[in-house]
Image (cartoon, rainbow, N blue to C red):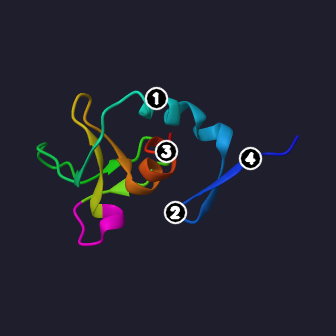
Amino acid sequence: MKQHLVIIHGDEWQQDHIAEPVQWAKTKVWVKEAWSSDAEGWEHDHCQICWWSLHKSEHAEHGVGYHNHDNDNWVCTECHDQFISKP
């Protein structure tokens, strides 16, 4: 059986390994914004799909993502554009 692969941040991922977090993320409302945290000492979050690090950075690939304010989760811009914003 042929594995379906996707590329995220230059790495190959088996599509079935991210299918569940992608489906979960599609049920949430995401707002694009610069990464921030109100929690003292909290220095980063991870994309709920690919585990990419999001943190304060001048580089948009790490410093900007999509935030779900209801449960304070993040997805990276690449995963959002590739899996969530597409119909």
Which label's residue is closer to the chain start, 2 or 3?
2
Of the two numbered discs 2 and 3 in the rendering, the one whose residue sits closer to the viewer: 3
Tell me: 7 left or right of 47.
right
Which amino acid does the dot numbered 1 rest on? Trp
Residue at 28% x, 52% y is 44
Q: Is residue 59 magenta?
A: yes
Q: Quadrant of the N terminus?
A: top right
Which amino acid does the dot numbered 2 rest on? His
The residue where tag 1 is placed is 24
Q: Calculate the distance from the C-alpha at mark 2 to the C-alpha at mark 3.
A: 18 Å
Of the two numbered discs 2 and 4 in the rendering, the one whose residue sits closer to the viewer: 4
Q: Calculate the distance from the C-alpha at mark 2 to the C-alpha at mark 4.
A: 17 Å
Which amino acid does the dot numbered 3 rest on? Lys
Of the two numbered discs 1 and 3 in the rendering, the one whose residue sits closer to the viewer: 3
Residue at 51% x, 45% y is 83
Residue at 30% x, 67% y is 60
Q: Calculate the distance from the C-alpha at mark 4 to the C-alpha at mark 1.
A: 20 Å
